[in-house]
Image: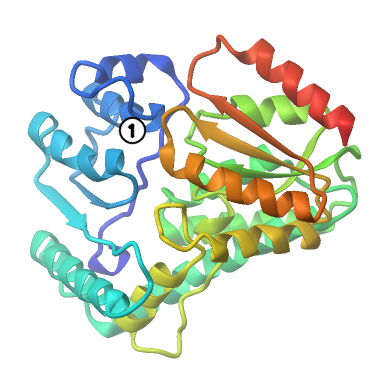
Amino acid sequence: VHAAGIIPYRIFKGGEEEPTTTADTYLQRNLCPFARACMGYALMGHYDFLDGVASTHTCDAIHRLPYVWEKYVKKPFFFQLDLPRVFEGGAHNYFKKEVIRFKGALEQFSGNKITDDKLTNSIKIYNKTRSLLKRIYELRKAHEPLISGTDSVKIVQAAMILERETCNELLGELKNELEKNSNGLKKGPRILFTGSIIADGDYKVMDLIEQLGGLIVTDDLCTGSRYFWDLVDESKSPIEAISERYFFQIPCPRMKSVKKRLDHVLNLTKEFKIDGVIYYNLKFCETFQYDYPIFKKELEKIEIPLLRLDTDYSELDIGQLRTRIEAFLEMI
């Protein structure tokens, strides 16, 4: 997208009830709040500045959402990138063909030829973003982390929508300032936060954890560490490297094998000296519900306490969440 001269903007706003209820006219209520919020914000005009929408098959709700968008929220460009669920056989080659098809659609829409040189330059720019974000996350390994978990996720989210050169400049400045700072956060139980997408505005649970004395020192979120954890290989041909990076990256639960993501989480518990894991599950988010029993079993083996929290975008359960989080932090 960047190599085509287009500004990439991730759609991830959520955390409010009004957009979800607005979307209920067009979507069933037993879809996750995030999918409904995406539709609701579009209907409310929040995404009027966008010229097009590209999506892929994650869960079924997000997979079908663009079709509803296309009917009720008119845009000149819509593209659906098909992503295989398995890693075996010819799955990667199929996905590489999908990336090439996406490249052609972007060229036709933008009128700009996406050359290998342009792709290589974009890869280097985005790899710099990933490296800077990873360094900022690594600073949270300290006994007294230099930045909170909520702020870290907000930084990653900002990196998803900012103009790339400006983004890298700001991240570099932040990294340098944090490295000079010797005043860390107050000590507390070290938490790994994992589960459903944390949307822009959906900080209810993370805020509660930190208000009650927990330290979210790392995460396994698509709007967190999984966005930047793996670099694109700059030694390979651009299309090959891009398709490999996005296909073989640390997967979300929609991919068949849970082992790679589970191994990643288990490694994080060691690297960041985790005291407990909080598993955040948006209501009706079936993919993360499927993975939870496996995570529970494996974390019990290494005696890492686990708390699962099911919630939505309402404020009605804050008291209940506060009680459960407070008890969990006291226990560990």
User: SS class of the residue under badge 1?
Assistant: helix
Q: Nearer the viewer, residue 120 or 37?
A: 37
Q: Residues within 10 Å of mark 1 (few under 14, many from 20)?
A: many
Q: Residue 129 placed where, x, y %?
A: 53, 64
Residue 295, percent from left and from top: 63, 50
Q: Residue at x 10, y 65 (%)?
A: 111
- Please count the marks in the image: 1
Figure check: 125 above or below 34 = below
Residue named by callout 1? 35
Residue at image location 57% in from the left, 41% down from the top: 154
Left-right relation of 271 to 24: right
In this rendering, position of residue 122 left or right of residue 262: left
Q: Which residue is pictured at 74% across the width and 60% down the height?
A: 138
Instruction: Tell me which colouring the rendered structure shows.
Output: rainbow
**Residue 61 lies in quadrant:** top left
**Mark 1: amino acid:** Ala
**Position of residue 260 measured from the top left corner of the image (x, y, whole percent):** 55, 66
Could you say which is closer to the camera, residue 61 or residue 170? 61
Residue 174 in percent (x, y) is at: 67, 53
Does residue 220 show up?
no
Depth check, front residue: 46 or 102: 102
- Asked if one can make out residue 146 in the rendered structure from this viewpoint, the answer is yes
Question: Up-down: is 165 above or below 223?
Answer: below
Tell me if residue 297 comes above or below residue 210 in the rendering: below
In the shown orientation, is residue 163 left or right of residue 158?
left
**Which quadrant does the C terminus fall into?**
top right
Image quadrant holding the N terminus, namely bottom left
- Identify the residue at image location x=16%, y=54%: 79
